[in-house]
Amino acid sequence: MSTTPPEGADDVGGSVAPPPGRDPGDYGRSGRLRSTVYEAEMAQLQEQLVLLQYWIASQGLKVAVIFEGRGSAGKGGVIKRITERTSPRTVRVVALPKPTERERTQWYFQRYVEHLPAAGEMVLFDRSWYNRSNVEWVMGYCSEEEHQEFLRSCPEFERMLVRSGILVLKYWFSVSFEEQRSRFEARNAEPLKRWKLSDMDLAEHELYVRYSMAKDTTFQYTDIKQAPWYVVPSDDKRASRLNCISHLLSQFDFQDVAPDVVELPEMREIPYVRPPMHEQTFVPRRY
């Protein structure tokens, strides 16, 4: 079995040289961002994400962010960092399981429509309707006719969303074959992470070139000006998270509308006698 995929955009994991303006000392010998730099930068970006959520809520914006890409490319990691400090009432995650028997008989986009954002919401799709042109097509879970119909209808579907007032942002996380293999091997070696290594991951790794073909075809039809694709090279996980969140923030001309500091009220005195403490059952103190 070959371990050298053909050259192509999706096989590029990112340059090892620091980007212009960055201190080379921020990177280790491997060319990857140091953890101390990453943590400091992430803290600042998460502060901005909190301000962004206030802005989205105050302006009644409707934002749909799609995260796609190969297995182990880092989609879940960046979603976790985005939601770490934000409110789930404003910023929520949609990660749908495989469709039910009933959903398989519906219009393909139907089960995703009910999860689209209302005013004042940002929805993060951890995989999306693009399952049809990637996983389903590569693994043979859809017919060629269904695949072709998706490629025809998806651009119109997304244009319709944009016309309705939804901002659609699409991120594709790209990881090289070598880096994907390294991450899968790390999962396999650690019992606490082995659950993350599924049969689908193994099949995807074996069919790496087929997934490249699927991605290239998807982009050919759906990289539209109303909702373009943004590729995130993610061999360096830390840098990819920062790059993606920074770009996400740059798509909004938002202002600081965070609520002012409030004065906490004093406890109101109310006549009341509580029952004895010994009548309650407490968790044993082990720490």
Image (cartoon, helix red, strand yellow):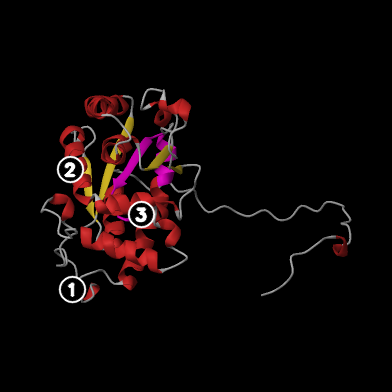
In reply to whether residue 66 is colored magenta, the answer given is yes
The image's mark for residue 78 is 3
Q: Residue at x 18, y 49 (%)?
A: 209
Q: Residue at x 32, y 38 (%)?
A: 131
Q: Amino acid at mark 3?
A: Val
In reply to whether residue 280 is colored magenta, the answer given is no
User: From mark 2 to mark 3, how far is it between C-alphas?
Assistant: 25 Å
Do the residues under discs 2 and 3 have CB atoms within 8 angstroms? Answer: no
Is residue 239 visible to the viewer in this orientation of the structure? Answer: no
Question: Mark 1 highlights which residue?
Answer: 24
Do the residues under discs 1 and 3 have CB atoms within 8 angstroms? Answer: no
Q: Amino acid at mark 1?
A: Pro
| Residue 98 % position (x, y) | 43, 38
Question: Mark 2 highlights which residue?
Answer: 213
**Which quadrant of the figure contains the N terminus?**
bottom left
Do the residues under discs 1 and 2 have CB atoms within 8 angstroms? Answer: no
Q: Residue at x 17, y 54 (%)?
A: 11
| Residue 74 % position (x, y) | 33, 55
In the displayed structure, 47 sits above or below 219; it is below
Q: Is residue 140 left or right of residue 107?
A: left
Q: Amino acid at mark 2?
A: Met
User: From mark 1 to mark 3, how far is it between C-alphas?
Assistant: 24 Å
**Which quadrant of the figure contains the C terminus?**
bottom right
Image depth: mark 2 or mark 3 in front: 2
Q: Residue 119 falls in which quadrant of the image?
A: top left
Image depth: mark 1 or mark 2 in front: 2
Is residue 179 visible to the viewer in this orientation of the structure? Answer: yes
Magenta-drawn segment: 53-74
Q: Secondary structure at mark 3?
A: helix
